[in-house]
Image (cartoon, rainbow, N blue to C red):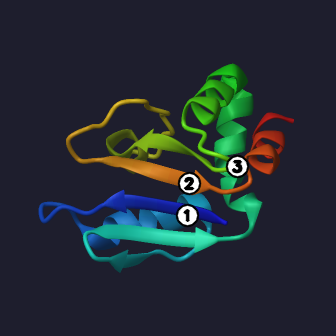
């Protein structure tokens, strides 16, 4: 399972964030409490992340972040929400004031293979 989520603040445009997420990942997103969340079992939702990894030659960075966040067979990657809203992918380790976009997954080996091969 792959779960993509981000916090939603009162000052943010919920529809704009949902449209950006849906455009990037190709699945539908819904507001759940104070978050916007989308879930799927299809690994191809990460195709644009894979393209970024390939183009930017940052496989080692992505592997480091996956390993750093690994718990059992699950892990996560985080993207800067502000740069994401501008159509860019920027992996982060720290928290930002408007929160990050979190991509959680429960099959680390499959995700690593997909993103790095």
Which structural element holds mark 1?
strand
Q: Do the residues labelled 2 and 1 touch (CB within 8 Å)?
A: yes
Which residue bears the numbered disc 3? 73
Which structural element holds mark 3?
loop
Q: Quadrant for the N terminus, please.
A: bottom right
Which residue bears the numbered disc 1? 3
- The residue sitting at 63% across, 55% down in the picture is 105
Measured in 3D between alpha carbons, the distance from the residue under mark 2 to the one under mark 3, in whole angstroms, is: 11 Å
> In the figure, residue 45 lies in which quadrant?
bottom right
Residue lying farthest right?
Answer: 117
Q: Residue 104 carries which label?
A: 2
Q: In this view, does 94 lie above or below 114?
A: above
Q: Residues within 10 Å of mark 1 (few under 14, many from 20)?
A: some
Depth check, front residue: 92 or 24: 92
Depth check, front residue: 44 or 23: 44
Closer to the eye: label 2 or 3: 3
Where residue 20 appears, as percent x and y from the top left, is: 44, 61
């Amino acid at each position: 399972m792959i779960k993509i989520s981000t916090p939603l603040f009162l000052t943010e445009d919920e529809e704009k964030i949902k449209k950006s997420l849906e455009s990037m990942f190709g699945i539908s997103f819904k507001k759940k409490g104070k978050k916007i969340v989308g879930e799927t079992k299809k690994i191809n939702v990460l195709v644009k992340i894979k393209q970024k990894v390939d183009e930017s030659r940052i496989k080692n960075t992505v592997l480091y972040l996956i390993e750093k966040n690994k718990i059992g067979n699950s892990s996560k990657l985080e993207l800067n929400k502000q740069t994401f809203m501008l159509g860019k992918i920027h992996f982060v380790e720290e928290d930002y004031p408007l929160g990050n976009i979190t991509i959680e997954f429960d099959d680390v080996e499959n995700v690593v293979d997909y993103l790095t091969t």
